[in-house]
Image (cartoon, helix red, strand yellow):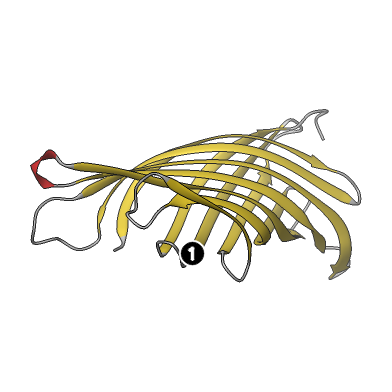
Amino acid sequence: MSYNGSGIPIQLSYRYRGIKSRHNICLSYTKSKLSPSTSLSYGQHSMEHYHINLKYGYHRYFTSFLKNKVKLFLGGTWNNNLSGRKHFYYRNQSEISGDAVSSLDLSILSEFKMSEKNRIIDEISIPIIAFVLRPGYSGKFPVSTELTSIHRFIRFKNQLSYERSLSPFFNIRFKYNFIYYQYPAPQKIKLGMDHFSIEILFKFGGK
């Protein structure tokens, strides 16, 4: 079943941009109100989705193209996701489920410097190894845990952003995030999320 809805993300992040390296620490929280994309004949059904993500990423310069306008960095991220879902059914019935994933990901970061004040940044990551905590066969607690890899746990994450300098101390960033993951057992789950955000960045040192 697919759901549509909206939420307001809250995010705190810190980035370090060195000559040959990139560091990124990010903590985000999103609460969304969702409803099925199709009407159900047996009554109303809605869902509240809570998502927390804590990420640390490190990338090292690999190569460049187009006279250093495009730079490619290789590295990894430590991703921690906590996802909680509360389903509301007809006759005031409800059900709680969720899952948590901590993973080490292979990551590729690319930067396209359009001008001194404008750049496009894209980051793609996939997990190499992951610790997964998830519901059992009933979809409820107690949960099962598993240390797994890409053959059992699949996740694709893409973060695309456009950044523009407003002043020596502030940037504005338009960011699109897309996450898709799935695991087959004990309960097959497929989850896709995307969101768009506008962020104001403070630059330490005014660079």
Front residue of 35/21: it is 35
**Quarter assignment of residue 107:** bottom right
| Residue at the spot 40% in from the left edge and 61% down from the top edge | 187
The amino acid on which the numbered mark 1 sits, given as a three-letter code, is: Gln
Residue 9 image position (x, y, % from top left): 47, 38
Above/below status of 164 relative to 178: above
The reply, left or right, for residue 178 in relation to residue 56 is: left
Residue 72 image position (x, y, % from top left): 81, 63
**Quarter assignment of residue 50:** top left
Above/below status of 204 relative to 33: above
Q: Quadrant of the C terminus?
A: top right
Front residue of 156/93: it is 93
**Quarter assignment of residue 31:** top left
Front residue of 48/96: it is 96
The reply, left or right, for residue 67 in relation to residue 46 is: right
| Residue at the spot 66% in from the left edge and 60% down from the top edge | 125
| Residue at the spot 88% in from the left edge and 58% down from the top edge | 61
Q: Residues within 10 Å of mark 1 (few under 14, many from 20)?
A: some
| Residue at the spot 45% in from the left edge and 39% down from the top edge | 30
